[in-house]
Image (tube, rainbow, N blue to C red):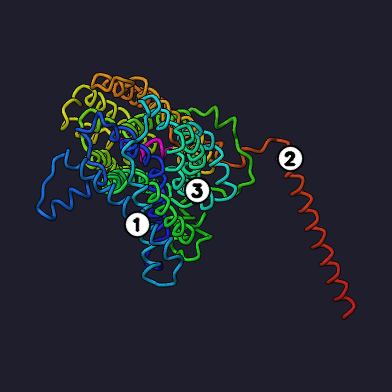
């Protein structure tokens, strides 16, 4: 650790943490394609073969045999009957022989249990009879209560630290994934309730992270560090195709088990390597600690008991401009992120592997673009070629306005598969500039209350997370056509362009006066503090006088 900067390690842990956070959000977006759409017999011609058929295809390819789709169905029936017969024979043998301590017999029983479990989890041919409206409710339910914990996330992080709040928020969200398959088979309304609770808990994560950023990252490095938040993009880019292949070879159920395992592993690393402040870190070098503290200066004050200037925050124009920019950007991002798998599968008839890969690719490009642009933004700030406000506005022009224009192109030319890939990738890529725009501006205007400000922004910005899927469900209910999706994308473009224009006209990224704790004290409190100081000063003066008198008395006695 002596040769590696602590904040570099922090960047990677935060990066993976946000990848895990978005893994929880998007896993249902890709699995629902298999849970509902691909399991319908009426669309079997455009589906990837079911798991047993996929295995049969692999076996046939290795043995040099070929089969038609009809052969797969008859083969599955024959294989299923054979497996059921083998199960019955195994059960009969077990009852007739009774318990045994023989190692081979025990291994056989364990293997049989594993086989039965695998067969149960792979048996998803019937699927769920959810229409487009119900699918929209399921997809949007994660965000119904997600906004409720945005402000509490920042408050709790100030009081208990980001390490605890962000870590547990992610970990509990991942552990809840283990229960999604069970409640899905029970009732789609039970799944909605579980996703609402999952969204409520994970809503603490984002605002909590800004508290850590304010305490660890020097001002001219914030654009680069905030790109760690876009680990969410890489998470989408990696997990979409990964989940697609998991579903192709096994079942959508195993996607949620994988999420729980990955989240648990990350949480252990988070506990060991992350600390709330540089001063608490046991392995940070003295030079790095001095550099961070000197760079932050007096702009960050570690006093969680100090009051919060709610009135100043809620009436601050810079705060609301950041909220507006976040609203538009998140509307665009969530529309692309949540609906892309269904769009590619339904409109362009791609199989689950292609859908996963092409839905995740734009988010990988988004992360790369965000990192490159952040280096450019920090260069402009470091060399003072542009003011901090203008750098944030430039980033917002790219992440909102240019993004929106690209979505307009997608709306009109997306009927062509190649054009759809290009424009979707470009739109998602351009949103990556948000790490140097409104997202970083929140820390600029108030490092001390960045978590709370981001909580307010997140509370408002998260609303598109369930409004957008609802609108998509209404527009495409029984009408899965390119024309209906065109309206979806045009609404998205209007949100992006409108919010971007407002931000450019009215935004300000300078440090706000209410960031200073001393500005929170009224005149009475200041008078009270001054009186206390005077009393202490008088006491100290009297003690010094008594000490002097005592010393003089002892000197006279000696004489």
Mark 1 lies on a secondary structure that is helix
Any magenta on residue 432? yes
Any magenta on residue 343? no
Query: Alpha carbon of mark 2 to alpha carbon of mark 3: how far?
Result: 47 Å
Sequence-wise first label, 1 or 3: 1
For the stretch drawn in magenta, the main secondary structure is helix
Q: Nearer the viewer, mark 1 or mark 3?
A: 1
Mark 2 lies on a secondary structure that is helix
Residue placed furthest toward the right? 557
Query: Alpha carbon of mark 2 to alpha carbon of mark 1: how far?
Result: 89 Å
User: In the image, residue 435 lies at what x, y percent?
Assistant: 36, 41
Q: Residue under label 3, please give it.
A: 172
Q: Which mark is residue 62?
A: none
Quarter that holds the N terminus: bottom left
Q: Nearer the viewer, mark 2 or mark 3?
A: 3
Q: Which mark is residue 527?
A: 2
Query: Alpha carbon of mark 1 to alpha carbon of mark 3: how far?
Result: 42 Å
User: In the image, residue 506 lies at what x, y percent?
Assistant: 41, 25
Sequence-wise first label, 2 or 3: 3
Q: Which stretch did the figure color magenta?
A: 431-441
> In the displayed structure, does residue 405 sit left or right of residue 172?
left
Q: Residue under label 1, please give it.
A: 89
Compared to residue 222, the image places residue 409 above or below, namely: above
Compared to residue 398, the image places residue 110 above or below, namely: below
At 25% from the left and 40% from the top, the residue drawn is 352
Residue placed furthest toward the bottom? 558
């Amino acid at each position: 650790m002596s040769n590696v900067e602590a904040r570099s390690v922090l960047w990677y842990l935060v990066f993976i943490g946000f990848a895990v956070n978005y893994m929880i959000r998007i896993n249902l977006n890709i699995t629902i394609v298999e849970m509902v759409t691909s399991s319908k017999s009426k669309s079997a011609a455009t589906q990837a073969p079911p798991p047993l058929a996929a295995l049969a295809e692999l076996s046939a390819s290795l043995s040099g045999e070929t089969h038609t789709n009809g052969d797969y169905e008859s083969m599955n029936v024959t294989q299923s009957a054979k497996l059921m017969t083998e199960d019955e024979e195994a059960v009969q043998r077990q009852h007739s022989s009774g318990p045994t301590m023989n190692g081979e017999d025990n291994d056989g029983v364990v293997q049989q249990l594993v086989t039965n479990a695998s067969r149960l989890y792979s048996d998803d041919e019937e699927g769920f009879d959810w229409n487009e409206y119900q699918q929209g409710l399921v997809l949007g339910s994660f965000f119904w209560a997600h906004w409720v914990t945005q402000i509490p996330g920042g408050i709790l992080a100030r009081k208990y630290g980001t390490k605890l709040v962000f870590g547990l928020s992610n970990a509990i969200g991942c552990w809840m994934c283990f229960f999604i398959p069970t409640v899905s088979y029970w009732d789609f309304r039970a799944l909605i309730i579980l996703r609402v609770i999952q969204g409520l808990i994970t809503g603490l994560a984002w605002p909590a992270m800004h508290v850590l950023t304010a305490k660890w990252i020097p001002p001219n490095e914030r654009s680069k560090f905030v790109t760690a938040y876009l680990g969410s993009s890489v998470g989408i880019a990696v997990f979409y195709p990964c989940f697609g292949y998991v579903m192709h070879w096994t079942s959508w159920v195993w996607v949620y088990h994988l999420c729980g395992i990955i989240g648990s592993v990350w949480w252990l690393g988070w506990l060991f390597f992350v600390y709330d402040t540089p001063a608490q870190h046991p392995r940070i070098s003295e030079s790095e600690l001095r550099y961070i503290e000197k760079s932050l200066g007096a702009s960050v004050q570690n006093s969680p008991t100090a009051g919060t200037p709610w009135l100043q925050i809620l009436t601050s124009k810079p705060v609301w401009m950041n909220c507006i920019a976040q609203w538009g950007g998140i509307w665009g991002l969530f529309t692309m992120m949540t609906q892309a798998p269904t769009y590619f599968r339904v409109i362009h008839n791609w199989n689950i592997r292609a859908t996963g890969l092409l839905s995740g690719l734009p988010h990988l490009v988004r992360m790369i673009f965000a990192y490159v642009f952040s280096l450019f933004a920090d260069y402009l700030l470091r060399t003072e070629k542009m003011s901090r406000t203008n750098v944030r506005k430039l980033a917002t022009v790219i992440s909102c306005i240019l993004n929106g224009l690209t979505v307009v192109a997608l709306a009109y030319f997306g009927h062509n598969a190649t054009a759809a890939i290009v424009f979707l990738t470009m739109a998602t890529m351009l949103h990556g500039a948000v790490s140097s725009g409104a997202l970083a501006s929140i820390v600029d205007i108030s490092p001390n209350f960045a978590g709370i400000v981001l909580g307010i922004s997140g509370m408002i910005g998260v609303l598109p997370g369930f409004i957008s899927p609802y609108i998509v469900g209404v527009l495409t209910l029984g009408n899965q056509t390119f024309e209906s999706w065109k309206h979806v994308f045009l609404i998205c473009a209007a949100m992006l362009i409108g919010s971007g224009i407002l931000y450019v006209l009215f935004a300000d990224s300078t440090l706000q006066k209410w960031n200073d704790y001393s500005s929170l004290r009224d005149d009475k409190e200041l008078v009270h503090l001054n009186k206390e100081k005077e009393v202490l000063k008088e006491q100290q003066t009297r003690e010094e006088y008594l000490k002097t008198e005592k010393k003089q008395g002892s000197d006279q006695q000696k004489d």
